[in-house]
Amino acid sequence: MSVALTVLLLWAFMSVSRDTPTGQLLRRWMVDLPAKALNRLRRWHLMLGVGLIGLGCLLIWYGGNDGLRVASMTLPDMFSWFTTIEVSTYFDVLTALVAASLLTKVRSTWVVIETSLLRFWRRARGSASGSRRE
């Protein structure tokens, strides 16, 4: 559940911060690289996957209840291997990505505010000094 939530949050951050370097990095990792990998798949990859799944189903069917028991005994071990990475690591990475995207947005916003204030200050100073000369 937490992995699915993390992926959904990363997709949301990617869609919100499109023009930032973090958004571009997320797009590269989550859209471009999987698309290239799926583009490299050939017909024999699909045949190999279907064959392996079919072989597993055949072994379960041939072994009767024993095959099903062996397959079901491996499921907890597989899930424990998938969950060996702590959930706090996902939240740390997520927090770092959010902070990086917010910092780039804040920094660019600050640059816009600073340049507009400087422009306004120069115009105000120029018009004030021009009225004194006249």
Image: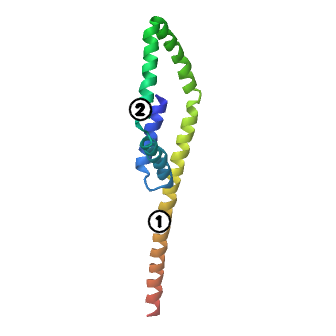
Looking at the picture, the colour scheme in use is: rainbow
Residue at the top extreme? 65
Does residue 41 sit above or below 112 in this rendering?
above
Q: Position of residue 117 (x, y in %)?
A: 47, 70
Residue drawn where x is 44% and y is 9% of the image: 62
- In the structure shown, which secondary structural element does the residue marked by tag 2 occupy? helix
Residue drawn where x is 45% and y is 5% of the image: 65
| Horizontal side, residue 43 vs residue 84: left or right | left
- In the structure shown, which secondary structural element does the residue marked by tag 1 occupy? helix
Residue in the foreground of this view, choosing between 123 and 36: 36
Mark 2 residue crowding within 10 angstroms, few (<14) / some (14–19) / many (20+): few
Q: Quadrant of residue 81?
A: top right
Report the disc number at residue 38: none
Residue in the foreground of this view, choosing between 1 and 50: 50
Residue in the foreground of this view, choosing between 52 and 118: 52
First reached walking from the N terminus: tag 1 or tag 2: 2
Three-letter amino acid code at the position of disc 2: Leu
Mark 2 lies on residue: 46
Q: Position of residue 118 (x, y in %)?
A: 49, 73
Does residue 131 sit above or below 100 in this rendering?
below
Does residue 82 sit above or below 96 in this rendering?
above
Q: Nearer the viewer, mark 1 or mark 2?
A: 2
Q: Quadrant of the C terminus?
A: bottom left
Mark 1 lies on residue: 113
Mark 1 residue crowding within 10 angstroms, few (<14) / some (14–19) / many (20+): few
**Residue at mark 1 to residue at mark 2: CA–CA distance:** 54 Å
Three-letter amino acid code at the position of disc 1: Ile
Q: Position of residue 17 (x, y in %)?
A: 44, 51
Residue drawn where x is 43% and y is 39% of the image: 41
